[in-house]
Image (spheres, grey):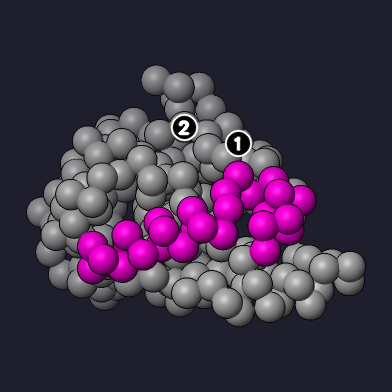
Amino acid sequence: SAASDVYKRQPQGFDYVGMCIRPPSEADSILIQATLGCSHHKCTFCGSYGDKRFAIKPRATLEQDLAFAQKYCRRQDRLFVMDGDAMIMPMRHWEWLLGQIKERLPWVRRVGTYANAKGVSLKSDEDLRRLRELGLGIAYYGVESGHAQVLKDICKGSTPEKLIAQGRRLKAAGIKLSVTVLLGIGGTARSMEHARATGELH
């Protein structure tokens, strides 16, 4: 597979490749790295995933990770799926992974992941509802700014309108939304415009 040439399995424990990032609120969660890097990887402010190319990890690797969690992570009742925009995985991968989590880790109460507008837009409303039914409870959604020009300047690959629309779709499906905005991303030149436009997003 594409991923197999990028990394080698650790002798024991979870298979983590490169720098792994999770939200502060997922500090005590089981961390499953289902994808490598970010499929977009163009945002000018982000240096998080330059050490790896985007790929979906093989199921055999994830099965070993889940087996490790099944044995050693019984005190952790939340799970976070990495990397940067794991939401973009096709439904067949999500359905398999969430099904395995339910079967192998039945004590896990909530699964979370990072999401961006593109990844959400590739899922139908039915897909999003299905993800919720299977246990995806929260999406950490990178908005960064509500100002159209700022989004262009940082190469976000989205617009305020698209960010709002896809965020609403997540909420309508019953998936909790945790939105990230970057307070200084407009710079001194667009500081007030950025703050006002971002504050008006809803």
- Horizontally, residue 188 falls left or right of residue 141, namely right
Q: For the stretch drawn in magenta, what is the main secondary structure?
A: helix
Going 39% across and 34% down the picture, which residue do you hit?
57
- Horizontally, residue 169 falls left or right of residue 19, namely left
| 46, 17: nearer the viewer | 46
- Horizontally, residue 131 falls left or right of residue 162, namely left
Going 21% across and 72% down the picture, which residue do you hit?
109
Dot 2 crowding, Cα within 10 Å, few <14, some 14–19, many 20+: many
Could you tell me residue 37's position as x and y percent?
54, 42
Q: Are marks 1 and 2 in contact (CB under 8 Å)?
A: yes
Q: Which residues are magenta?
A: 147-175
Going 89% across and 71% down the picture, which residue do you hit?
188
Q: Which residue is mark 1?
A: 52
Report, in whole angstroms, how far the alpha carbon at label 1 lies from the one at label 2.
9 Å
| 163, 92: nearer the viewer | 163
| 115, 110: nearer the viewer | 115
Going 44% across and 36% down the picture, which residue do you hit?
9
- Horizontally, residue 110 falls left or right of residue 146, namely left
Q: Is residue 169 above or below residue 196?
A: above
Q: Which residue is mark 2?
A: 55
Q: Is residue 31 above or below residue 110?
A: above
